[in-house]
Amino acid sequence: MDRTTIIQDPDYGNKAEAFEAFDDIPTNPNLDRTIGDVINARYGRRDVLRGMLGVSATTALFGTSALIAPRAAQAASASRYVFNELTWGNDERHHIADGYDADVLLRWGDPITADAPEFDVMNQTAEAQLKQFGYNNDYVGFWPLNDDATRGVLCVNHEYTNEEVMFPGLGRQDRVAFEGMTKELVDIEMAAHGGTVVEIAKDDAGKWSLVRDSALNRRISPLNTVMTLSGPAAGHDRLKTSADPTGTTVIGTINNCAGGMTPWGTYLMAEENFHGYFWTDVLDGEGNPDVSAQPEAISMRRYGVPGRWYNWGQHHDRFNIDKEPNESNRFGYIVEVDPFNPDAPPVKHTALGRFRHEGAETTISSDGRLVIYSGDDNRFDYQYKWVSAQVVTEENAVFGSSLLSEGTLYVARFNEDGTIDWLALVHGEGPLTAENGFNSQADIAIDTRLAADLLGATPMDRPEDAQPRGDGTAYIMLTNNSRRTEDQVDAANPRADSRFGHIIEIKEDGGNHAATKGTWSILVLCGDPAIAEVGAKWNPETSENGWFGSPDNCAIDADGRLWISTDQGTGWGRTGKSDGLYSLETEGELRGHSKLFFRCPVGGELCGPYFTPDSETLFLAVQHPGTDGTKDLKGFERDSTFEDPATRWPDFDPAMPPRPSVVVVTKQGGGKIAV
């Protein structure tokens, strides 16, 4: 299906729906390669820096418990998550399990600096938005500023914007002509992208609030935030533009989905669907972008550039590939931010690869090295991890550290026998040579997907968040893949037309996250277990409230317990339930047992989640409320607009549209979450 057909189709009533449908088209050209082809192509025939947590395919579903449990196992029949499960549903409000509060902490438009104007939704400006909380909050990170963690810095990504519920008078837009999207509105939505860094504090009553006069508070945006580039691609000719002939500086970051915090407290922003922000006026006969005359044509096709999701390139030349063909090579990286120094320019670390990074979750390996897990969130793309060359020390655990520029990037091959190989993306090794278009490590950094194709990595069902645990275990969220056919099924992606996703557990050899081999197993196959053709697999003790679809983000709390947030998108991927947060057992006889803890208002996606070090506070991000898969009170699909949204959460003010917001969860009376 071509882009024009998708975006004009009445079944795709909002930006999120249209994007998801268009992005359902994979860009990996190697889907018909056998494992034999792959092998032949490659082989030719302080306290650990404070705060860090210290199988075969036939046993893939409910396999053995953790090789090294994070704490002593409880009785097999007793859930480690102590709360009364929430009943599933889908309505205008958010809901939390009994005994807990879920308070709105920050909303789109809230002023975050002392000199910021109050939010005026009818008179928005880019200047005001640059001092106000951004749109569509996704990743949330927290770092304590005092010993008892009652003050801290909160870091929040702002992934994208929904103009139909953000601006008055636009309604359901023509996503081809972008009628009504003026430069003034484009600049506002650019200012609403990026990130927010703020100081927050907890009062004696246990409630959190913004410290508005903090010197740490700031916005990061693609409109005006200057960043530097580091690593092998910095200064390369393919990163040079007319505005930056050195190839070492870039303005802004885009589509920041999940992310991570380093062990020393810097904030990592993952650039995901960067391709959608680039424009061209050159179209083929079906209305699709035509890059055949571009010098970067092969790379652009593999990355889906230009996506033309936004019309920024009509007003800002750097987002128009006809005028600046190299600009897109400067996006798709992991961005490091120093939350403690507002004057420090963020750094894009090219050594960590260029792809649609979902997240950048960190840990320290048993031999002391920094490890970062990151998935490429596209159907039939790959799971990666970074391992630093040096061990982490007090001297190098700093912002802009060489720990993020000197090391090895690996891509995963999930073997049919339940083992995993981490394949090194190193210039000069195997097929990664000049003969195959890789003249240096810079080309691998820029064209990471093409390099991973040559190594024969396993095409996955949209690898999203990946969360490492301190014992050498990692959990990989695989959201869905409706494009996988029966003859493309493999052990790690066992369902064709996988509409509800699954979760893989990795056990690195020796419990060492830096290992190049390990084992994998499937923790759960998501979806409704009552519908046989779905093929869902859960622990049989899971209730009708506890199963879910489309796992997206995840977190591990201080007790080593796994929590999952969902993103069902729209249409075929929806279960009828709202998105929410679920506990998921990983150990013992209850392995694969899930319980619903929090659910979103209608049309919202749940992001975050992030625990304070004591696990007494949980931060959640409710993104795009009132948009995805919205229905009226009779259950019929409906458009959601600024004037007539599906919900006015969280304000429920008739003059205010829905506002993406960060929610803070605490236990009534205090104490650890779910204990």
Image: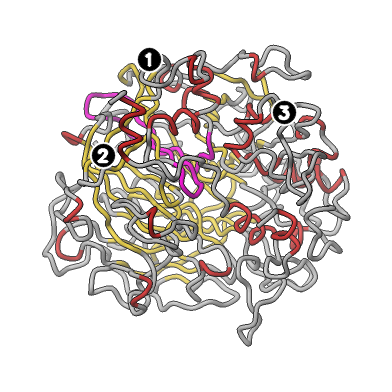
Seen from the viewer's position, the closer of residues 168 and 459 is 459
Tag 1: Cα neighbours inside 10 Å, few (<14), some, or many (≥20)?
A: few
Q: Which quadrant, please, contains the C terminus?
A: bottom left
Q: Which quadrant, please, contains the N terminus?
A: bottom right
Please tell me whether residue 550 belongs to the stretch shown in magenta: no
Mark 3 vs mark 1, foreground winner is 3
User: Residue shown at 15%/44% (left/top)?
Assistant: 68
Q: Amino acid at mark 3?
A: Gln
Please tell me the numbered disc located at residue 395.
Answer: 1
Seen from the viewer's position, the closer of residues 94 and 614 is 94
Q: Which residues are magenta?
A: 355-381
Which of marks 2 and 3 precedes in the sequence?
3
Please tell me the numbered disc located at residue 23.
Answer: none
* Vertical side of 287 occupied by 537: above or below: below
Gap in angstroms between the C-alphas marked 3 and 1: 44 Å
Q: Amino acid at mark 2?
A: Ile
Mark 3 vs mark 2, foreground winner is 3
Gap in angstroms between the C-alphas marked 2 and 1: 33 Å
User: Residue shown at 76%/73% (left/top)?
Assistant: 644
Kindly identify which residue carries mark 2.
420
Q: Helix, strand, or loop for circle 2?
A: strand
Residue 210 visible to an observer of this rendering: yes
Q: Is residue 672 left or right of residue 14?
A: left
Residue 367, quarter of the rendered image: top left
Kindly identify which residue carries mark 3.
294
Which of marks 1 and 2 precedes in the sequence?
1
Q: Helix, strand, or loop for circle 1?
A: loop
Which of marks 1 and 3 precedes in the sequence?
3
Q: Is residue 503 left or right of residue 509?
A: right
Q: Residue furthest bottom?
A: 634
Gap in angstroms between the C-alphas marked 3 and 2: 37 Å
Residue 66 pos. (x, y %): 17, 49
